[in-house]
Amino acid sequence: MSSSVETPVNRRRHKNWRRRLTPYLFLAPNLLIFLTFIIWPALRGFYISFFDSIDGSNFEYVGTENYKAIFGDPTVAIIARNTAIFVVFYMVFSTLLSLTFAIILNEQRFGRGFFRAIVFLPVMLSPVVVGLIWNDFLDRKVGPLNAMLEAIGGGSPGWLVEPALGMTAAVFVGIWVHLGFYTIILLAGLQGIDRSLFEAAAIDGATRWQVIRQITLPLLKPTTLIIIILSTIHGFQSFDFIYTLTGGGPLGATTLIVQYIYERAFQSPIQYGLGSAAGVILFLIIFAFTALNFLVGRRRDAV
Amino acid sequence: MKINLRKSIAIGASLALTAGLSLVGNVAAQAAPLTPTAAQLAAWKGKEITYYFYQDSAAELDTTKKQIADFEKLTGAKVKLDVIPFTSLDTQLQARIAGGNTPDVARLNNPGFYHNVALPLEQYLGRNYVKEFLKGSTTQVTHPTTKKLVGVPYDLTINGPFINLDLFEKAGVPVPTSWTWPELIATAKKVQAANKSEYAFAIDKSGHRVSTAMSHMGAYMVDSKQRNVLRTSPFRAEKAIKMITDLYVADLAPRDLWIGTGTRYSSPTAVFLSGQLPVFFSGNWNVAGLSEGASAAKFRFAAVPNPSGLNGGGWPGGKFLMAFSASKTPDLAAFFVRFLANTEQMEEMCKAAFWMPTRGDLSESGINYPKRASDMKVFLADSAKTPSAAYGIQSVPTLTGPIYNKLRDLMTDVMAGKMTVKELVQTQITFIDQQLATLKK
């Protein structure tokens, strides 16, 4: 009975409780979506990885057999190597190029909006469509790129039929699709740097390269770390544009781990459990790399 | 031009599993009138079913939409048409079934994947319903253990070549009326050289299509008793496969389309429609699409007979209709299947989209194709010449996809110089053994 009495203490407690609850209420809709469409399927995928199912309705418990099958599959080593090559090149060049573009765009005075829109435009395209368009563009015999190369005596490289060139094309198209996204994030980071530091450097007679090296890059480090983490995750997750660009070819040279998951889970003969187990392995790899990037970044900051 | 299908399709299809049986004897009398009872009409009014559909041509979609409108008028029910790209037909359907979002009815290419979730039709459409179709054509929609009809054959397909008539004419090469594979290749090269076209030949990136050439050389992969028969004549298979891979290696065929598309299916239809391809090996389902495309591109094309060797004819395939047991209105779903596959609707579709019918009555009466009748005549003639061994692989409907796809992927390795044709055939023999072993589990 006493709790219902409106004393100043009770009112304060009630107010505090409401204040604490408010942010969670704002977060609730997103959290609900996140739990329903990300966390629950992820947990379910982990569970399914211990079963075998050819139709998604009937499941037979097989313990760790799916994991053993993956590690015993000789193609997995090739796919792991492909994925590692893709991720390293994609991450390094995405980071370097987005940094370059962000710095250039940040200093741009003429046509700033136009150039930013141009850089960002590929992000707005469907990756599936991007893959198809580049597939046509890179065709060895009838593609416009080789037509241009031939016109200047550059021959007709088999972009989509030579394994090394296929990987090059996949990395290039991947960077082309996502570069605008990373550049915009870095641009936001650049604009957060105090302008007075640049003015002081100019007064001190610092060269442009010195400004970049000693002011811009160090202060942009937290944002760059985000780009490294994001591009690593995107690299591991790459599938849609590669599937329409090369289909994982030539000769499996651009078959990455997500395509392996897709083909095991959704192409005949269907093996949902095996696909899920591969998904769990991919999650662990991405988690490990992200944690490593994060820890290395933090340690450097601390030093 | 009225084409009598009985002697062509019926012979080819029935040879598969019913050698020696007369087709006419298997064809039942006309189906009962397609009129729902008053009770059915009352129960179906306002109900909705989903039709999972893919198209090979605009004509198929247009005709289907019209037939759905007729069905809705007849029953008072609604049909939601889900049009799916062919390339993700099975992927999407399997995901939908696993996710509890099974459509009521689907048009399928690989019905064997869905036998266990299909609606047995006989309980809704009667035991004799199966007799309305050509007997050999129902093999893939007969449940392997219950032996019940779980779908209907919707159209028959036969693989075969198309030629660009304009390129042939410019090269002064007559339209072939019969030829062998060496002659086909020599002709294609000659026409290419005369026209300086980009390529001489192209074939759909498909083990199913390549099986046609193997059949011509007398090589098969699985027989009607579910046995691996590739090991009995590997040299014949090597000959057929080498003939095709050599064309790709020599850049006489679009290598990018085969090697550069990884594990994806790809068709050189667009290359043919660009007018840069003298010979395109595909099948009758492309007649409507090519007709639409070639009219726009302003060139003439024609279907020509399959090359022959030890055997002639084409390679059989087909599309199927299946209702699913997860349907909330199974009787309505079954009735929709029956409606689409009845004489009137099937005849309409055959005429509009150049299909070959699966119904006994239409096979008997023939189809009056209003256009491209000469092309259909070629395919029908090849259907009749198709050897019974070509139907053997249909005895393992769940394995046809993996077996064809493995052949396709191994050919990629050969084209890229990663493997010899001899090694390909040996690898394929081992793979077929492994696949057949899964049937016994």
Image (cartoon, helix red, strand yellow):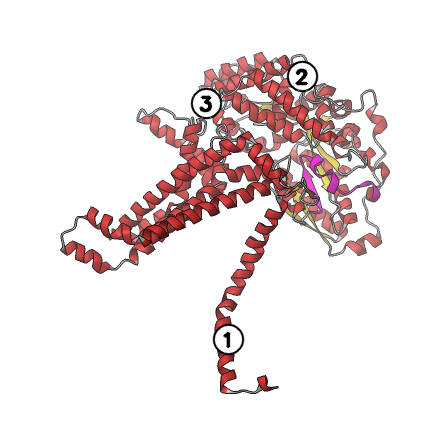
The chain carrying label 3 is B
The quarter of the image holding the N terminus of chain B is: top right
Mark 1: amino acid = Arg
The kind of secondary structure element at disc 3 is loop
Nearest to the eye among marks 3 and 1: give it.
1
Q: Is-magenta flag for residue A56?
A: no
- Residue A301's tag is none
State left or right for residue A35 relative to residue A164: right
Figure quadrant of residue B130: top right
Mark 3: amino acid = Glu
The chain carrying label 2 is B
Query: Label 2 belongs to which residue?
Result: B231
Query: Label 3 belongs to which residue?
Result: B198
Q: Is-magenta flag for residue B117?
A: yes
Q: Which residues are magenta?
A: B103-123
- Residue A18's tag is 1
> Dot 3: within a 10 Å radius of its alpha carbon, few (fewer than 14), some, or many (20 or more) residues?
some
Residue that appears at 65% across and 48% down: B99
